[in-house]
């Protein structure tokens, strides 16, 4: 063991099932575990404070786990292709290890880093562990194209067999001949490589709520085991049957932990396999295994489809003449309290923003989710917006969520609304989904006058949804005829009623 190694943590913020980290420990005499705050990725204005808090929690947990192994995490700032060469020289590095990342931005970044590493005589070693399989292999197995239906995807996976089993976390024994110099860097060194705080990063902490989903591997594994101790629930889990309006999550809420790599997808897969063993259980696509396969499906599609995250020049995406209406978009953009919502709630708000009501480009919703959701995974986010806007994958554009009927069906008393919109909590259930229809006497009794204390509807769903179905039909017809419609958006008509954003600002003054 002669190498001096930098292990570069990116998404795989964990010790368990981290084959790149294990390979570093087996073949090096010194290791520097590094996390890079990249301004191109970790932008304060592009990433919401809840997501930042989750990331910092995950890094703090990772640092604590490394210190138990007589190591530590070095946090540096800057573009990887700029800061890593400096570290190569300062620390005498001969090897760089990391977990493979499939995103186009990450591939481009890693190529630049690999070129700089080669210039400095540093060997680059990466391992696949963020996905269940090697997605390039899936595409190869499918004749060089990404499978674009779930059924076809499952067929391809049958030929590949089950995912590899996860590798164990490194132990003190694995570290006995490996040292981390500057373990207790005093003074300036500690500040140079220490973890930042939300304050230092310039975040406004005044609106932060209680931490419901703490970041970190320890919390991820605790939550996983907590769920696995309910074998009946695990085996009977069917995603469509969970409750979108439950005041406590009706799903696992492990998605943020998988997104940041605090929990390995392969570890999740095989723990489920253990629970399923010998028992009757649900199956993909609705089972928990099925949810991990959906993740893999979108990852594979994002690699095989150019410009997957946008409409223009995306070969699988229907070109639609979406409107531009900043005021509508601002009214829609409210997701700041907890950073997580049930998948059916995501379906409903995504349909409302795009083909259902507001007719705004799904890329705008994608940006909001990327900023505010704890589990804002690039590939899954783009794939789900393509699906929910009926731009790709899902073609039944005439199936539209009603913002009123959906809530009435899933939460008849409106408990979810009362929690998150307390201004409406005194409305009787009869009117809580349509407060504008309540007689003035009822509004006065509830202490909320629509148009004053709560905004009027920005659209009339029954009317606009029918109009939008016809617009979708026209877009599909153009696609079937091979006519490329203009990607230039239309300008929407500005409404006179105040937006939700305006109303919220007014209430906080």
Image (cartoon, rainbow, N blue to C red):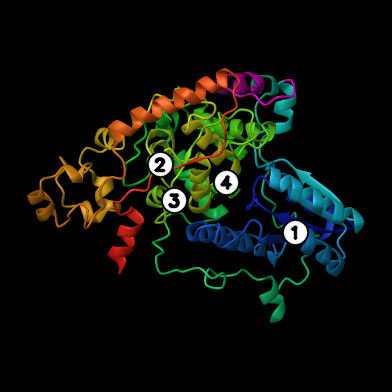
For the record, the magenta segment spans: 143-157
Residue at label 4?
Answer: 259
Q: Is residue 91 left or right of residue 131?
A: right
Distance of label 4 from label 2 (alpha carbons): 16 Å
Position of residue 324 measured from the top left corner of the image (x, y, whole percent): 47, 44
Q: Is residue 313 left or right of residue 355?
A: right
- Residue occupying image coordinates x 41% and y 35%: 351
Residue at label 1?
Answer: 80
| Secondary structure category for the residue under label 3 | helix
- Residue occupying image coordinates x 20% and y 52%: 450
Mark sitting earlier along the chain (4/3) = 4
Asked if the stretch drawn in magenta spans residue 285, the answer is no
- Residue occupying image coordinates x 42% and y 31%: 239
Residue at label 3?
Answer: 326
The answer to whether marks 1 and 2 mark residues whose Cβ atoms lie closer than 8 Å is no
Residue at label 2?
Answer: 342
Disc number placed over residue 174 in the picture, else none: none
The answer to whether marks 4 and 2 mark residues whose Cβ atoms lie closer than 8 Å is no
Q: Tell us which disc is closer to us: 3 or 2.
A: 3
Mark sitting earlier along the chain (1/4) = 1
| Secondary structure category for the residue under label 4 | helix
Distance of label 1 from label 2 (alpha carbons): 35 Å
**Label 4, residues with CA under 10 Å away: few <14, some 14-19, many ≥20:** many
| Secondary structure category for the residue under label 2 | loop
Position of residue 454 measured from the top left corner of the image (x, y, whole percent): 24, 54
- Residue situated in front as seen by the camera: 449 or 379: 449
- Residue situated in front as seen by the camera: 188 or 483: 483
Distance of label 4 from label 3 (alpha carbons): 30 Å
Q: Is residue 327 above or below residue 45?
A: above
Mark sitting earlier along the chain (3/2) = 3
């Amino acid at each position: 063991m002669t190498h001096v190694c930098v292990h570069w943590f990116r998404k795989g913020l964990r010790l368990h099932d981290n084959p790149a980290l294990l390979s570093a420990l087996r073949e090096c005499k010194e290791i520097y575990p590094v996390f890079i705050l990249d301004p191109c990725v970790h932008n304060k204005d592009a990433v919401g404070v809840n997501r930042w808090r989750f990331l910092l929690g995950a890094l703090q947990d990772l640092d604590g786990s490394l210190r138990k192994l007589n190591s530590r995490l070095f946090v540096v700032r800057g573009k990887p292709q700029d800061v890593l060469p400096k570290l190569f020289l300062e620390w005498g590095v001969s090897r760089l290890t990391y977990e493979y990342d499939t995103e186009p931005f990450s591939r481009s970044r890693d190529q630049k880093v690999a070129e700089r590493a080669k210039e400095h005589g540093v060997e680059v070693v990466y391992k696949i562990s963020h996905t269940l399989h090697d997605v390039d292999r899936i595409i190869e197995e499918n004749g060089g194209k990404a499978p674009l239906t779930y059924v076809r995807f499952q067929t391809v996976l049958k030929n590949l067999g089950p995912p590899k089993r996860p590798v164990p976390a490194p132990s003190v024994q694995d570290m006995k001949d490996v040292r981390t110099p500057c373990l207790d860097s005093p003074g300036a060194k500690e500040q140079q490589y220490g973890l930042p705080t939300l304050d230092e990063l310039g975040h406004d902490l005044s609106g932060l709520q209680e931490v419901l989903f703490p970041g970190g591997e320890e919390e991820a594994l605790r939550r996983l085991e907590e769920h696995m101790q309910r074998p009946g629930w695990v085996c009977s889990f069917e995603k469509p049957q969970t409750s979108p309006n439950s005041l406590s999550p009706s799903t696992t809420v492990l998605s943020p932990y998988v997104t940041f790599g605090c929990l390995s997808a392969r570890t999740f897969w095989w723990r489920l396999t253990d629970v399923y063993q010998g028992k009757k259980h649900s199956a993909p696509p609705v089972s928990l295994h099925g949810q991990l396969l959906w993740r893999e499906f979108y990852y594979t599609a994002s690699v095989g489809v150019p410009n997957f995250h946008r409409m223009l020049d995306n070969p699988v995406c229907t070109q639609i003449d979406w409107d531009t209406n900043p005021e509508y978009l601002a009214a829609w953009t409210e997701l700041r309290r907890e950073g997580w919502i049930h998948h059916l709630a995501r379906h409903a708000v995504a349909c409302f923003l795009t083909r259902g009501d507001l007719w705004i480009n799904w890329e705008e919703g994608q940006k909001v989710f990327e900023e505010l959701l704890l589990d804002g995974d690039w590939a899954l986010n783009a794939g789900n917006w393509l699906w929910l806007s009926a731009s790709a994958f899902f073609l039944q554009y005439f199936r539209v969520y009603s913002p009123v009927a959906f809530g009435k069906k899933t939460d008849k008393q409106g408990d979810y609304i009362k929690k998150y919109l307390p201004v409406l909590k005194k409305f009787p259930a009869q009117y809580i989904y349509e407060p504008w229809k309540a007689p003035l006497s009822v509004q006065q009794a509830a202490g909320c006058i629509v148009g004053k204390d709560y905004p009027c509807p920005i659209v009339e769903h029954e009317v606009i949804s029918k109009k939008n179905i016809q617009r979708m039909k026209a877009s599909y017809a153009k696609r079937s005829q091979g006519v490329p419609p203009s990607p230039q958006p239309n300008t929407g008509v500005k409404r006179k009623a105040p937006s939700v954003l305006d109303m919220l600002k007014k209430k906080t003054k």
